[in-house]
Image (spheres, helix red, strand yellow):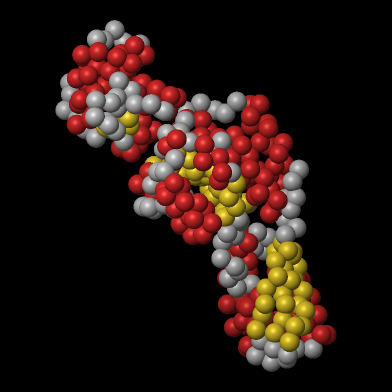
Amino acid sequence: MAMDTELNARARHLLRTLVGRYIDQGRPVGSRNLARHSGLNLSPATVRNVMADLEDAGFIHAPHTSAGRVPTVQGYRFFVDTLVTLNPLASQTSEEIEEKLKDTHPVSHVIDEASEVLSMLTNFVGVVTVPKREGFGFRRIDFVPIDRRQLLAILVFQDGEVENRIVETDREYGASELERAANYLNREYAGSSLREIKQRLVDDLVQARQEMDELMRAAIELARSAFGPGADQDVVVAGQTRLMGYEDLSDVEKLKTLFDAFQEKREILDLLQRCVDCDGVQLFIGEESESEALQPCSLVGAPYQFQGRVVGVLGVIGPTRMAYDRVISVVDTTAKILSAVLNQTA
């Protein structure tokens, strides 16, 4: 946007005001309206000239002929990155989040509660990926025969969660043999995460083939299957119906496509996965999501951790016309509190 310094600063102020007015009111903002609420002593004609420059630069556009202007995705992005002022969430709200999460057990219920809290505080959709079990400490394992060459491996984690996995075997195992194998694995690997165990198993298997007896080799072979990849990651979604009350999402076909995406979850999971390696809060505004279903929306997401490792992502999905300052604070605070609560379970 080719402007001198004074006009550039003025344009930034007017863009901030326009976006704020549109988020609050949901109606296109005209030059008179903008001049009146900008706090600057400017005539509507001067404001119109600045708005024309902002429109040429792609920050705002007119949804209808002779209408006021609304922000574009580029305008929202510029607003969020350079113009919005982020304030810490009120201590009362932070305490409310902590209160709802801290006494909830097991972890699956904490995740459910976190998605509900995000939805309640923003009036949008709360989404939280279920933690990957690979990052949690392993407490014990038991094997239960199902068929001649099929076992049920029951994994208990340090946070109290239990996961059942089917293990296919090359031969039939007796009950006493399975009990001794489980005792060995519980003694050698308890306290480690599945990720750490899988790294150790490769070296231990080599050693087992060279030095250990048949029982130890069998235990490690069973462990390789039992501690392998678990089920595909899931995402908990809360508050989808809240979106039906927003005029921005009133198009029936777009709303149906969006609800299908919530049902399928794949696109939402893929988008949340892009937040895993982010430092703090990440935003995808409108078409930035690269998802046709989510184009009318923005996603504000942040990773959460367990023992210093990212195990999932939480966030909020709502119309692009959202109060980004508040939503960012809600998401950031909830991610930090959820991380703290999970670590208290260790």
The residue lying toward the viewer, choosing from 197 and 250, is: 250
Q: Residue furthest top?
A: 41
Judge whether residue 46 can be spotted in this image. yes
Q: Position of residue 115 (x, y in %)?
A: 61, 45
Q: Position of residue 319 (x, y in %)?
A: 45, 39
Q: Is residue 159 left or right of residue 205?
A: right
Q: Is residue 112 left or right of residue 78?
A: right
Q: Residue at x 27, y 31 (%)?
A: 64
Q: Position of residue 264 (x, y in %)?
A: 51, 59
Does 136 appear above or below 331? below
Q: Is residue 289 left or right of residue 221?
A: left
Q: Residue at x 70, y 70 (%)?
A: 164
The residue lying toward the viewer, choosing from 18 and 275, is: 18
Q: Quadrant of residue 199?
A: bottom right
Q: Position of residue 230 (x, y in %)?
A: 60, 69
Q: How many marks?
A: 0
Judge whether residue 332 can be spotted in this image. no
Q: Quadrant of residue 226?
A: bottom right
